[in-house]
Image (cartoon, grey):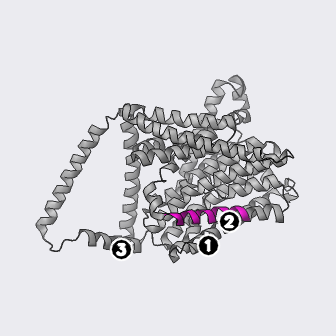
Amino acid sequence: MLDGLYAQLGGPTSVAAVIISVALMLIVGFLFTRITKLLRLPNVTGYILAGIVIGPYCLDFVPQEISAGMGFISDIALAFIAFSVGEYFRLSVLKKNGKKVVVITLFEALLASVVVFVLTFFILRLNFAFSMILAALASATAPASTLMTIRQTKARGHFVDTLLTVVALDDVVSLVAFSVAVSVSLGTLGSAVSAETILLPIAWNLALIGIGILLGFALKFLMKRHSTDNRLIVAIAFLFVICGVGAAVEVSPLLGCMAMGTVYINSTDDEKLFKQLNYFSPPILLLFFVKSGLDFRLDALFDVHTMVGVVPLIVVGVLYFAVRIGGKYLGAFLGCLVTKQPRKVRNCLGLALVPQAGVAIGLAAMAARILGGDMGSTLQTIILSSSILYELIGPALAKLSLYLSGSYGAKAEAAEGEKEELKTSPPVSTEGVSTEVATLEARLLEIERELEKKRYARSPEEAAFLDAADETESEMTSDYMRRKFKNRR
């Protein structure tokens, strides 16, 4: 549609064309979030839909040459996602939940993969390599949607702690499963499966984990030795190092970036760096998901002549969507049953594991690049189409699971209020005591703020990033309180 304009600018790959295309991706992606916000859908859904609309099958605003040259965006975006997931691998939480959460994660992730593989290979008779990789991708869960729902509802308790740990560990399982699946698939496509084709990618993943651990400790050291205005520079540079090494050896950088985030949070307990990166990353994540929408083969999905083996692509996509949900729920249920979790956790956990977007889309893009041809593009089409559906219903199911488990709502507030009353109620109640306590708390808060200012000599840039992040959290809290008082009226 804009071919004439790009031709006047020097062609679709000229600097001007690239900049205008990126600007269009950012603007349209933002505009679509205004629509999804009204519908109470996650931003990810809006980004993907924006990419489809400005892609080659609708308005055709962005040349395919530009989209094809933005493959590096996937690795960078996934690096930010993986590093932020590492924040939730706190040793204190892992020790508290222990082996039970590991068992639950293995059940729900692997059972989803098994049922998808049985469906695609044994029932639909699809290609072995295609079935292996699609089954591995089925194990992944999108942490962003689940975390967003928890923050919006202010949910808390044993169910939330279990859910957060399962979601974090889930991506580790899916990454390992994906690495093995790609290795085996490449061996079968080349008609030669050897120990080297299977073990070498696993060895490279372990090496990336080692690099991530070392860089996590280096990040801790540099955060102490250097001024805070360089925190973003150092952190992003380290993430890019892991991305570069991963791209060079053709393995996912996610495990390395996740290891780096895990080491840093456990060795420093510094959440500020994660806030900075989370505030910095939205434009990158927007470009990543919009690009995914640009690569979406809309015509192939609805073309009855487009087959995967002998099965129409739309049939494979619909069956994958339904079977994965069943595998996730059944796996979580059995895992909770084996570990003797409370009934509410057992019945509700699987509902919160439905969303699938960031990690799965990134891995699908990586698989499409490695496999190439129709198999790679078909795999990416199925994951993208199902991810849109998962993001449409996933947050609603996650919210339902939090409500049914009593993690938020009237019951949760009453229970929390009783706990706080038992903790804070003095044996004898007097008006003077409460006034003195309030004054003391205010004074302690002022002292804490002064110490915080001295501890961190923040630059204006860092202050802006952290203040913006704090404002976002305050707005979410204000919205929650307004809805709460409105409902009481």
Residue 173, quarter of picture:
bottom right
Residue on which the image places disc 3: 414
The residue type indicated by label 2 comes to Leu
Residue 286 appears in the picture as rendered:
no
Q: Which of 262 and 51 is in front in this view?
A: 262
Residue on which the image places disc 1: 334
Q: In which quarter of the image is the N terminus?
A: top right
Q: Do the residues labelled 2 and 3 touch (CB within 8 Å)?
A: no
The residue type indicated by label 3 comes to Ala
Number of numbered tags placed on the structure image = 3
Q: What residue span does the magenta drawing correspond to?
A: 98-114
Mark toward the start of the polypeptide (1 vs 2) = 2
Magenta segment includes 55: no
Q: Quadrant of the C terminus?
A: bottom left
Task: Give the CA distance from mark 3 to mark 1.
Answer: 30 Å
In this view, 464 is above or below 375: above
| Residue located at (71% from left, 36% from top) | 68
The residue positioned farthest toward the front in the image shown: 195
